[in-house]
Amino acid sequence: MGKNIKTYTKELIQLALPIIMGHIGFTFIMAGDVFVAGKYSTDVLAAVSLSGAITSLVFMFGIGLIVSVSPVLSNRLGARKSTKKFFYPTILFSQIVAIVTMFAIWGTIPVMERIGFNPNIISDIKIYTFIFGFSSFGAYLHAALKEFLQAYEIVFFPNFIAILGIFLNIALNWILTFGFGPIPSLGVVGLAIASVLIRTIMGLGLFIFCLYYFNLKYQRINNKYYSVLIKVGLPISVAVTLEFLAFNSMAILMGRVNSNYAAAQNILNVISSASFMVPLSISNAIAVKVGFANGAGNLEDVKKYGFVGVGLSVGFMAICGIFYALFPQVFAGIFTNDKNLIDIIVPIMYIVAAFQCFDGLQASCGGILKGLKKTFMVSVANFIGYILIGISLGSYLAFKMHLNLFGFWIGIAISSACVGLVLIIEILKTYNKLKREANLK
């Protein structure tokens, strides 16, 4: 007898809940940086925001490569193939990506000097960016091992580490930024050092856990494994980078007009990202479940996990949108007391509220396609939606219609809806193809 919808829902939620905990931890680690920077000074907040707007494009490209680990391994597990031998190759892969990412982040520093930001914050932007580059090693180690464990549906401990990281991050940020006892106030340097330390601690903590849990021995490098990771992960990297490019372009372009817009956009990103962590986590759970079902050739499970996952994601984001629309000033006030920033943020919160449902739809659909290892169309959809539509329409509304940041968010909301529509079409196309192939066997 097949499973009912309640069973599929329960299984997805059980897998997603710890992942939600971890993603919320990751987001609140970033939110902690924003919170402490905002309490220190608006200039430092703007410097960290503008640095993050550029460096995150590079950083998330690497993350996109690494998140291919769990769908690749879950497909192998579904097909009853060995996977533990890929533990050390996964670590090596993450650290190679980290080295490339670090140098790429440093390569953005000369670009930042030429964009035309406020000269008063350029030195802070440069020093924060340089130090932040070292955080790639710990961050990618943690991300890779989290993905490795996720394929086995071992999700509690790696995400519990992220929750602990929230509190340690705020403590380190506050102590190193404002000073404490013999430790002097380091300002923006303290924020950057705290970012490196917390990510390194999280990565090493998860590495020790994996050694203890699996009692793994070193296995030789598997080049075929790397090629599969790149094949699946590269489109994800492109897709993630394009989405971040759309969001961060708002901060970069508007930051040239007024640094307050960059600071406001950073706060809006944190607010919208906080709710996005739930559909993103559900998307990860979908990718694992669909990947296992796809590897086992169980199309019924592929369909049901996908359908239920989309419903959970969109439903949750609809609820978040209602709260954002009802209490915009409350959410803005969490991160800043600056009236100018609050006046910019509050009207945009209504657009953010509408954006939530579309964001939940595209995230969950992306998870289905990751599980099916059909990631190319995800990058195509993001290019069409966020670049051709989002940035173009957003720029027109911001500068030609003089709507500023409000106009950019209208463009992004529309583009997200377009991405979701393209992904739905691709899912239906892929599922029908798999069904025809199954009927021929």
Image (spheres, helix red, strand yellow):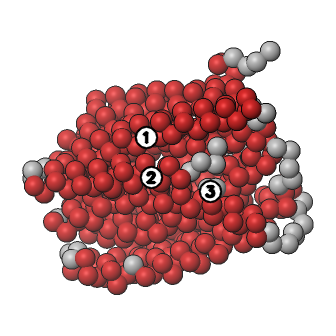
Task: Characterize the local packing of mark 3: few (<14), some (14-19) or many (20 or more) Cα atoms within 10 angstroms.
Answer: many
Q: Position of residue 45 (x, y in %)?
A: 32, 65
Q: Name the residue: 53% across, 58% down.
A: 235
> Of label 3 and label 2, which has the lower sequence position?
3
Element under disc 3: helix
Q: Is mark 3 in CB contact (under 8 Å) with mark 1?
A: no
Residue bearing the label numbered 1: 422
Q: Hey, what amino acid is under mark 3?
A: Val
Using the image, determine if residue 33 lies above or below residue 272: below
Quadrant (top left, top right, bottom left, bottom right) of the N terminus:
top right
Q: Position of residue 243 (x, y in %)?
A: 40, 54
Mark 3 to mark 2 CA distance (whole Å):
14 Å
Which residue is outermost to the left? 401
Q: Quadrant of residue 413?
A: top left
Residue bearing the label numbered 3: 232
Which residue is outermost to the front? 440
Q: Name the residue: 29% across, 41% down.
A: 414
Q: Position of residue 59 (x, y in %)?
A: 49, 67
What label sits on residue 269 in the rendered view? Answer: none
Residue bearing the label numbered 2: 380
> Of label 3 and label 1, which has the lower sequence position?
3
Q: Hey, what amino acid is under mark 1?
A: Val
